Image (cartoon, helix red, strand yellow):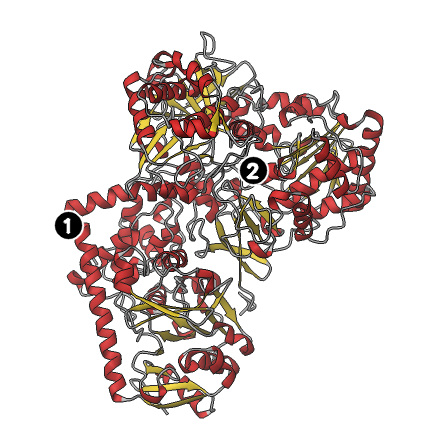
């Protein structure tokens, strides 16, 4: 039996899964167990598409197929949270197991606050994440910095501050992330600023940091973060699907150190990016200039885990006249007003922007300022945001009833 | 569970709109499209999409889709079986062919259809009816590029890939509004600008692309040759031309030099002061690597081919061909403009630009196709086929085109179609053109079939089937296979688009090495690619030009005014163009909620001063009249166009620019002068 707060080493007892999975395959084993034992109806996870640079979300209902999702893909820059809302009915009618990075977990909480996903029906298996590299950048980086044909790479990993590749002929090659990123390669900019490395708001937080001794490389470090997580792990262990042992205290200490180092790195990048933005008018000027290239593809809205309104204010013609290029700055002001207190820095608004506008940087900069002012941290629990009220339907009713023109009642 | 049935699926495919060829994921749930999600793995757009691409799934399940073959009886369309439709088409085409010969038939194919379908349609026309009257709508967008670049460089395609602008020092753009018309190629410009590259945009309009430029040059509409000649004059005058390149790799320089001598000062023609021309000449010529990017502002004129050749001249004059960061690149407006031409849906070439007039080529094709008597003569081009309706063309097959809205002079098109004995239209919707048909065949959208599109950078991208066509609608390649069997033809035993593609490879040396397997990863392959172990050719003309003598050809080209210029009676110059939010005649984009929200109806841009003088308010409905027709549309008062100049888009049937446009043709490419006509503007009394 395990309980919330426990830290254990865990590994799958299935030799087949252990073969295809990494670090003991606890995550894959747990998902399979959850499917087999009717703990979830389906699993949402990521599998390899055309090659290891291609991360494809997939829904699995047959436990036999779970092995497809084994292993990690650091070139997968997907955000799974919004997919649950958009395509899976917010998990209202199904119990869904889902593997989550920090940003996925944060996005899910923000959607849950807005009644867009049903947290009760989600079983979140968190995985540590030191950041991800966009697939096209990764291929360029491997060709230009590693001087290796990206098609010959059979495995990639981020470990001990290095991006490491293994080629078909078994060669390993690693280059420090700092060097790669100083040269314009490496992780996405939002990942560099990220400080959600171990997603403890999931039910279990899993990873390889802190697995030492004879279990190194053969077990997953699991921190039990909720009663639901404890129940899953206990049942899986009891059924013999997962084996566990108490985590080595030295390993726990090392895990803490790794996490702290990552957090410090996040702080360093935040300072660098935010200082580059300047302050006050200067910052506003930069944002206005950069966003004046906008072509209204709405990717920043469609892919944002905060945005969900049926009636989006950016489509109100008295706020943003349709068809005008570039759209007035109001388009972006609406997003800032509605999103910034809850921005989780998932980076999708920037990564998917066809006009290379640093959307995520602006929103994240605003969010960190607001967090300092109001003390509200988005994405970690179910605490409601400070400014932007989140119930669209209720809000629209209030507007209709009071004749107020305030979309969000900031004075309440 | 009902929501997914465990079947939520991503199908990676290629966007059906412009010629950039962006990759995207269609999201399929329980046999229906439910959305588009980014495909981050593709090097072309890295998951990023424009408003059209992001909404491209919406029209697919429209209730307006055609779902059954229709045969017109007593003026009404009656539902029919496929066999009835096939039998009728086969017997009518056979009868017409036997009675009136190969010149009595016309075949037209859209550049939005996959390579496999373009190929099989031209094969059917040529094999069954021995006619070269087969053309595609590149004729009315980049026909002059094919003609002009072939004459200058020996190949009618873009020389360098989109991303290659990152290797340029100067990007010279003319007649191209890339940010709106090719947004994800526009993204490369944004990246280039961020990397400190200099962008020059020559355009009569202040477009979103012009806004991005370091140097925007406004010049009078359709004065491209004069402007480019003057730039070349000053390059030569200031001794900035690349003598070594000219000497080693080109012919005809003396002819060019002599011609441009008269173009020192062209301000009276172009409206651009000489000092400004000199500045631009220096910027372009002093760059280590400079690329030219152009679009329909160059081609859709009766000087189209000469405009393109002038750009070829400019690039060769400075040695800017055959290296990274250089070249001359037409941006293709449709997903498969490049491919439709490559596939030989063209009146004088088989696939891979193998000339029909060449006896050895024809003999080889006859052997490969197992036929005899292939036609050698240049067939009738797209808009000329319309003019020939009735005499000698009696029967026509229009595949996925909407000529009534998209071809010049709509009244002329409608009158012509009425003269046909028999018209087949194969499409997704009951278009303005389909109404004139005797048989309408319901085809499949890009999401309902496999195949390939060749983008503007000659990259062949896979199109993957995500869902079934609605009702009895069929995958278009299958329709042609069935029809070929009804006609009793040999050589059409294809069971899949891949089978057809392998037939393309078999007969097309420049594409022989490109298998479906090689196209599985989104990098795919740029043609030419003659063998399986050949890497493909992202950059053309590296060592030598693709021409027969291996050299680039200069041409001394004189400025000519458009066929119809503004005069006292029709004092305004009407240009036409495209919008970010719509695609062609809106049969697809008009059915996407977001795009309709952005721009629900047509309009005309008119300069502030003209509007003030005529007391026209922004948003007021006004009447435009040309010698060919009239339309009423909304005035958009702006300084984006110069005084005396108007701009309309070609998207809206209810405010159809093509009621006004001119059918005058470019003599070499038969491109109609869509971008320049003379009109008058009137207020509509009593209407606001």
Which quadrant holds residue A4?
bottom left
Provide the chain ID for the residue under circle 1: A
Asked if badge 2 and badge 1 are on a common chain, one would say: no
Can the viewer see residue B80 in this picture?
A: no
Q: Is residue A346 left or right of residue A65?
A: left
Label 2: element kind? helix
Residue on which disc 2 sits: B337
The numbered mark at residue B175 is none
Label 1: element kind? loop
Which quadrant holds residue B637?
top left
The numbered mark at residue A279 is 1
Q: Nearer the viewer, residue A260 or B303?
A: B303
**Position in image of residue B254 (x %, y %):** 45, 18
Between disc 2 and disc 1, the foreground one is 2
Q: Residues within 10 Å of mark 1 (few under 14, many from 20)?
A: few
Provide the chain ID for the residue under circle 2: B
Residue at 38% over, 24% down:
B204
Can the viewer see residue B163 in this picture?
A: yes
Quadrant for the C terminus of chain A in the image: bottom left
**Position in image of residue B309 (x %, y %):** 49, 25
Indicate whether B69 appears above or below A150. Answer: above
């Amino acid at each position: 039996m395990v309980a919330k707060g426990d830290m254990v080493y865990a590994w799958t007892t299935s030799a087949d899964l252990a073969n295809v999975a990494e670090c003991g395959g606890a995550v894959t084993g747990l998902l399979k167990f959850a499917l087999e034992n009717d703990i979830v109806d389906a699993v949402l996870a990521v599998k390899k598409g055309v090659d290891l640079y291609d991360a494809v979300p997939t829904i699995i209902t047959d436990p036999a197929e779970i092995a497809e999702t084994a292993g990690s893909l650091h070139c997968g820059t997907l955000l799974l949270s919004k997919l649950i809302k958009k395509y899976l009915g917010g998990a209202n009618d199904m119990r869904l197991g889902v593997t989550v990075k920090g940003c996925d977990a944060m996005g899910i909480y923000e959607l849950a606050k807005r009644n867009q996903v049903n947290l009760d029906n989600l079983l979140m298996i968190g995985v540590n994440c030191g950041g991800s590299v966009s697939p096209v950048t990764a291929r360029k980086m491997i060709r230009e910095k590693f001087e290796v044909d990206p098609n010959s790479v059979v495995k990639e990993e981020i470990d001990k501050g290095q991006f490491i590749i293994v080629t078909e002929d078994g060669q390993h090659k690693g280059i420090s992330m700092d060097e790669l990123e100083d040269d314009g390669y490496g992780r996405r900019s939002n990942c560099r600023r990220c400080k959600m490395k171990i997603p403890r708001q999931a039910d279990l937080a899993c990873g390889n940091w802190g697995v030492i001794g004879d279990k190194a490389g053969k077990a997953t470090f699991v921190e039990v973060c909720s009663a639901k997580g404890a129940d899953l792990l206990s049942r899986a262990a009891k059924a013999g699907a997962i084996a566990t042992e108490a985590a080595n205290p030295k390993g726990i200490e090392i895990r803490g150190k790794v996490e702290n180092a990552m957090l410090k790195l996040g702080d360093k990048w935040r300072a660098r990016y935010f200082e580059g933005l300047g302050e006050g008018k200067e910052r506003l000027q930069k944002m206005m200039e950069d966003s004046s290239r906008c072509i209204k593809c709405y990717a920043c809205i469609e892919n944002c885990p905060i945005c969900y309104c049926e009636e989006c204010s950016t489509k109100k013609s008295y706020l943003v006249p349709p068809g005008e290029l570039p759209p007035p700055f109001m388009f972006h002001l609406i997003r800032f007003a509605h999103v910034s207190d809850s921005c989780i820095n998932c980076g999708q608004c920037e990564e998917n922007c066809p006009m290379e506008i640093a959307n995520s940087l602006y929103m994240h900069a605003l969010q960190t300022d607001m967090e300092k002012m109001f003390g509200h941290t988005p994405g970690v629990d179910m605490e409601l945001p400070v400014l932007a009220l989140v119930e669209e339907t209720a809000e629209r009713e209030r507007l209709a009833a009071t004749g107020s023109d305030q979309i969000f009642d900031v004075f309440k | 569970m009902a929501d997914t049935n465990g079947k939520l699926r991503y199908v990676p495919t290629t966007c059906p709109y412009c010629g950039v060829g962006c990759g995207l994921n269609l999201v399929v749930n329980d046999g229906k499209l439910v959305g588009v999600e980014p495909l981050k793995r593709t090097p072309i757009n890295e998951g990023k999409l424009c408003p059209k691409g992001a909404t491209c799934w919406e029209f697919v399940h429209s209730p307006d889709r055609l779902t059954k073959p229709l045969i017109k009886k007593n003026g009404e369309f009656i539902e029919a079986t496929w066999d009835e439709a096939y039998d009728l088409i086969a017997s009518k085409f056979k009868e017409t062919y036997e009675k009136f010969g190969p010149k009595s038939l016309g075949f037209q194919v859209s550049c939005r259809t996959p390579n496999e379908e373009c190929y099989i349609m031209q094969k059917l026309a040529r094999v069954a009816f021995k006619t070269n009257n087969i053309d595609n709508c590149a004729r009315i967008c980049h026909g002059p590029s094919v003609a002009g670049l072939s004459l200058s460089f020996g190949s009618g395609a873009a020389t360098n890939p989109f991303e290659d602008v990152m290797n340029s020092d100067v990007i010279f753009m003319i007649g191209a509004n890339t940010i709106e018309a090719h947004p994800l190629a526009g993204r490369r410009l944004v990246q280039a600008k961020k990397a400190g590259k200099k962008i020059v945009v020559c355009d009569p309009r202040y477009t979103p692309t012009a806004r991005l430029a370091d140097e925007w040059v406004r010049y009078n509409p359709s004065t491209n040759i004069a402007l480019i000649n003057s730039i070349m004059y000053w390059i030569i005058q200031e001794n900035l031309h690349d003598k070594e390149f000219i000497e080693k790799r080109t012919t005809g320089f003396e002819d060019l030099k002599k011609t441009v001598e008269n173009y020192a000062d062209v301000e009276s023609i172009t409206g651009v002061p000489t000092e400004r021309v000199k500045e631009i000449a220096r910027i372009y010529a002093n760059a280590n690597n400079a690329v030219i990017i152009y679009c329909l502002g160059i081609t859709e004129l009766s000087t189209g081919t000469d405009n393109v050749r002038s750009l070829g001249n400019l690039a060769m004059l400075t040695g800017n061909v055959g290296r990274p960061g250089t070249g001359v690149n037409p941006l293709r407006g449709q997903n498969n403009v490049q491919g439709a031409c490559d596939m030989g849906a063209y009146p004088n070439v088989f696939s891979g630009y193998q000339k029909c007039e060449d006896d050895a080529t024809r003999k080889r094709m006859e052997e490969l196709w197992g036929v005899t008597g292939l036609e050698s003569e240049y067939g009738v081009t797209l808009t000329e086929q319309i003019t020939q309706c009735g005499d000698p063309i009696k029967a026509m097959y229009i595949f996925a085109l909407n000529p009534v809205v998209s071809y010049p002079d709509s009244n002329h098109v409608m009158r012509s179609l009425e003269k046909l004995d028999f018209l087949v239209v194969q499409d997704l919707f009951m278009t303005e053109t389909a109404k004139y048909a005797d048989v309408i065949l319901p085809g499949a959208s890009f999401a309902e079939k496999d195949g390939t599109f060749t983008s503007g950078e000659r990259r062949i991208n896979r199109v993957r089937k995500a869902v079934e066509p609605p009702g009895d609608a069929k995958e278009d390649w299958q329709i042609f296979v069935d029809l070929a069997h009804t006609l009793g033809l040999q050589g059409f035993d294809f069971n899949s688009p891949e089978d057809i593609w392998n037939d393309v490879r078999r007969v097309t040396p420049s594409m022989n090495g490109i298998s479906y397997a090689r196209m599985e990863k989104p990098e795919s392959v740029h043609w030419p690619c003659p063998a399986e172990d050949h890497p493909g050719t992202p950059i053309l003309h590296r060592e030598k030009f693709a021409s027969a003598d291996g050299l680039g050809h200069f041409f001394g080209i004189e400025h000519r005014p458009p066929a119809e210029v503004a005069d006292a009676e029709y004092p305004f110059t009407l240009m036409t163009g495209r919008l970010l939010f719509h695609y062609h005649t809106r049969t697809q984009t008009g059915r996407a909620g977001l795009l309709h929200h952005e721009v629900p109806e047509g309009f005309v841009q008119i300069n502030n001063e003209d509007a003030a003088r005529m007391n026209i308010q922004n948003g007021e409905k006004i009447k435009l009249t040309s010698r060919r027709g009239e339309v009423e549309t909304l005035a958009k008062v702006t300084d984006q166009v110069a005084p005396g100049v108007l701009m309309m888009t070609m998207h809206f049937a209810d405010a159809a620019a093509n009621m006004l446009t001119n059918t005058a043709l470019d003599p070499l490419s038969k491109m109609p002068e869509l971008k320049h006509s003379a009109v008058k503007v009137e207020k509509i009394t009593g209407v606001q």
